[in-house]
Image (tube, rainbow, N blue to C red):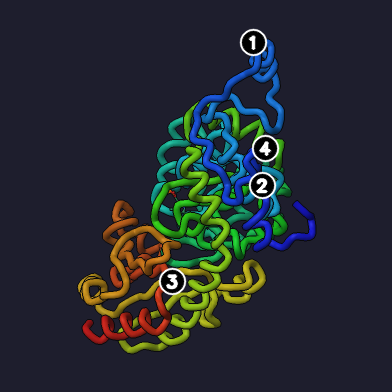
Amino acid sequence: MSKDWNKSTRAVHAGTRRSQYGEVSEAIFLTQGFVYDSAEDAEARFVQAGPDEFIYARYGNPTVAMFEDRIAAMEGAEDAFATASGMAAVNGALTSMLRAGDHVVSARALFGSCLYVLEEILTRYGVEVTFVDGTDLAQWEAAIRPDTRAVFFESISNPALDVTDIEAVSKLAHAHGATVIVDNVFATPVFSNAIAQGADVVVYSATKHIDGQGRALGGVILGTREFIRKTVEPYLKHTGGSMSPFTAWIMLKGLETLNLRVRAQTATASDLAQALQGHDKLVRAIYPGHSSHPQHDLVTRQMGQGGTVLSLDVKGGQAAAFRFLNALEVCTISNNLGDAKTIVTHPATTTHQRLPQEQKDALGITHGLVRMSIGLEDTDDIKADILNALAQV
Ligand SMILES: *Cc1c(COP(=O)(O)O)cnc(C)c1O
C-alpha cells in the first residue's frame, strides 16, 4: 500500500493478501486450523508466528487479517484486532488493559451494553468508574485523576447525538497518562480522524456501517501495534471474542463500498434535517451536521459532516411517537443503524428501556424521541414518508 493513498483507495485495496490463484475478490479462508510442514515448523510457529503465519482462527486467520489491515490503513492506526461483535471490541479494549484498583472516567451517554460493561462488569472486578457529561470539559477535567488508567466515550452519543471533543478530552487524559478509548460508530471510519485528533484506541461495531447491509455482527479495536498485539490480542485470543473468517469477508466487502454508502446516507440525512427544521409536529430535529446543533462547530472541526443518523423529538410524547412510527411505510421499525434500509427506533421503550427515568431525562431521551438511521432509499421517498407519517400524528 502506498502512503499517499487516500482513504477511499485504501478501503478497496489495503491489506489484500492474494493466494497462488491470483483471485480478484478476497478469498474466504474458511479454516480454523493451519498445517505445518514439520514438527519443528509447528514448534517454531508457537514460539513466534511470523506476520503471515497462522496457528488457529481464534488467534488469527488470513481473511480476518485482511480486514484488520484494511481498516487500520483507513483509520490511520498501526494495527487492529477484529472481534465477534462491537461489544466484544468495547469489552476487549477495556478489560484487556484494566485491573483491580484502576480508575476509569466515562461519558454517561452510552449505548446500553457499553453502559452495562462500565457500570456492572468492570466495577465487579474492582475497577472504579466515574461518569461525566461527555460534552462538559470541566467535568472531564475534574474527574480525571493521576491514577486514571482510561477514559471512554462515544464521539457522537446514541440517541441524543451529543458530540464529545476528542482532541480536548485526549489532552486532559494524556496529561495524567490515561489511555483514550473512543467508540466511534456514529462518526464511521469515513469521517473519523480520531487517532490524529488524539485518541489512542478507536472501537467500531462493524455490525453498523461497515457491514451496512444488516447481515453480520462484528467489531474491531484499532490502536498502536504495541497495544493491539501485547494487550488486546492475548486477551481476546484466549477469551474467544475473535471474528470469524466468513464475517471478516463480509466486512471486507463492506469496506469497499463504505465510502459511497456513508456519503450518500449522510447527504440524505443532511437534506432531511434541513427539511424538518421547525416542523410543527416536532419539538426538535437533531442533526450534528445542521447549524442548529449546539455543537455544530465542533462537528465541523472533528468530522466535517454530520453522519447518517438524525433524531426527531415528536410533540405529544410516546403516543405521538408511536403513531409516527406506525404510519411509516418506507422506513422500517428496528434497532440496527448504518444499514442500507432506513431504520427508526423509539429509544425510550427499546434500546434504552432499562434506564431509570432520571437517567433518560439527563440524556435527553424523551418519550417523543425517535432515532432515524438514514439508508440508501431515494431521498424524496424517505422525505415523503416522514412528512406523511408526521401528518398523521
Ligand atoms: C451497536 C453499538 C455497539 C455494539 O455493537 P454490536 O455489534 O451490536 O455488539 C457499541 N457501541 C455503539 C455506539 C453502537 O452503536
Q: Earlier in the sequence, mark 1 or mark 4?
A: 1
Question: Residue lying farthest top?
Answer: 39
Give the left or right position of residue 330, taking residue 63 as reference.
left
Q: Are marks 2 and 4 in contact (CB under 8 Å)?
A: no
Q: Is mark 1 within 8 Å of ligand 1?
A: no
Distance from Cα at disc 1 to Cα at disc 3: 53 Å
- Dividing the picture into quadrants, the one containing residue 110 is bottom left
Mark 1 is surrounded, within 10 Å at the Cα level, by few (under 14), some (14 to 19) or many (20 or more) other residues, namely few
Hey, what amino acid is under mark 2?
Gly
Q: Are marks 1 and 3 in contact (CB under 8 Å)?
A: no
Instruction: Write down the residue under mark 4.
Output: 227
Q: Earlier in the sequence, mark 3 or mark 4?
A: 4
Distance from Cα at disc 2 to Cα at disc 1: 30 Å
Q: Earlier in the sequence, mark 1 or mark 3?
A: 1
Residue 336, relative to residue 113: is it above or below?
A: below
Distance from Cα at disc 3 to Cα at disc 4: 36 Å
Q: Position of residue 301 (x, y in %)?
A: 66, 71
Q: Earlier in the sequence, mark 2 or mark 1?
A: 2
Q: Are marks 2 and 1 in contact (CB under 8 Å)?
A: no
Distance from Cα at disc 3 to Cα at disc 2: 27 Å
Q: Are marks 1 and 4 in contact (CB under 8 Å)?
A: no
